[in-house]
Image: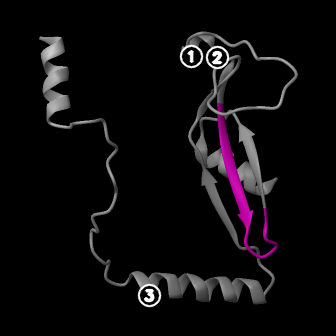
C-alpha cells in the first residue's frame, strides 16, 4: 500500500510544495492616513529633540550546546547534542532589537526575562 501511494502521487505529478502568500486581502480603509499621522508625529518628535525608536522582540530560543541552522567560522567542528530537548538547554534567550530612527543606529539586547514588558523597558532604558 505504501508503494502504491508513492506511484499514485508520482503519476499525478504531485510533489511537496510550499504555500505562496500571493492572494491579496484587499486594501484597508484609512491605512495611508495611519502612515501620514505616524510620519507627522515622527517629524514633531524630531524637531523638539525627542527620540524616535522602533522596538521588536524576536522568537525565543533555547541556549546551550544545541544545534543551530547556518554556519560559523571555526577551527574545528562544533559538537552538539543529537536532539534539542528543552531539558538539555541552559535556558531561554530572548533577542530584543531597538532601532533609533533619528541616529540610524540599532542594537540587540539578549535577555532571559519572561516579563516582556519589563524586559522591553529595561532594553530601552539601557
Residue identifier under label 2: 89
Chain-order first, disc 1 or disc 2: 1
Element under label 1?
Answer: loop
Identified at 13% across, 26% down, the residue is 8
Classify residue 58 as left or right of residue 28: right
Q: x and y percent of residue 65 in the render?
A: 70, 16
Chain-order first, disc 3 or disc 1: 3
Quadrant where the image shows the N terminus:
top left
Q: x and y percent of residue 25 in the render?
A: 27, 68
Tell me the distance, in whole angstroms, between the alpha carbons under discs 3 and 2.
46 Å
Classify residue 91 as left or right of residue 73: left
Q: In the image, which residues are magenta?
A: 93-105
Q: Quadrant of residue 16?
A: top left
Q: Which mark is residue 84?
A: 1
Q: x and y percent of residue 97 in the render?
A: 69, 53
Residue identifier under label 3: 33
Q: Quadrant of residue 94?
A: top right
Query: For mark 2, does the 10 Å Cα neighbourhood hold few (<14), some (14 to 19), or many (20 or more) residues?
Result: some
In terms of depth relative to the viewer, which is nearer, 79 or 65?
79
Main secondary structure of the magenta stretch = strand
Please tell me whether residue 62 is drawn above or below residue 77 in the rendered image. Answer: below
Classify residue 58 as left or right of residue 119: left
Disc number lying in front (1 or 2): 1
Please tell me whether residue 37 is drawn above or below residue 13 in the rendered image. Answer: below
Q: Which mark is residue 97?
A: none
Q: Quadrant of residue 31?
A: bottom left
Please tell me whether residue 119 is drawn above or below residue 86 in the rendered image. Answer: below
Chain-order first, disc 3 or disc 2: 3
Element under label 3?
Answer: helix
Contact, CB < 8 Å: mark 1 with mark 2?
A: yes
Q: Is residue 98 magenta?
A: yes
Amino acid at each position: 500500500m505504501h508503494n502504491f501511494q508513492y506511484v499514485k502521487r508520482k503519476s499525478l505529478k504531485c510533489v511537496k510544495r510550499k504555500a505562496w502568500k500571493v492572494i491579496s486581502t484587499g486594501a484597508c480603509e484609512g491605512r495611508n492616513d495611519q502612515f501620514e499621522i505616524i510620519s507627522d508625529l515622527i517629524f514633531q518628535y524630531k524637531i523638539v529633540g525627542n527620540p524616535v525608536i522602533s522596538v521588536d522582540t524576536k522568537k525565543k530560543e533555547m541556549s546551550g550546546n544545541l544545534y543551530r541552522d547556518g554556519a560559523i567560522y571555526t577551527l574545528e567542528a562544533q559538537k552538539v547534542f543529537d536532539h534539542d530537548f528543552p531539558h538539555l538547554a541552559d535556558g531561554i534567550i530572548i533577542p530584543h532589537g531597538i532601532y533609533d530612527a533619528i541616529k540610524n543606529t540599532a542594537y540587540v539586547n539578549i535577555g532571559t526575562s519572561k516579563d516582556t514588558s519589563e524586559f522591553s523597558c529595561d532594553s530601552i532604558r539601557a
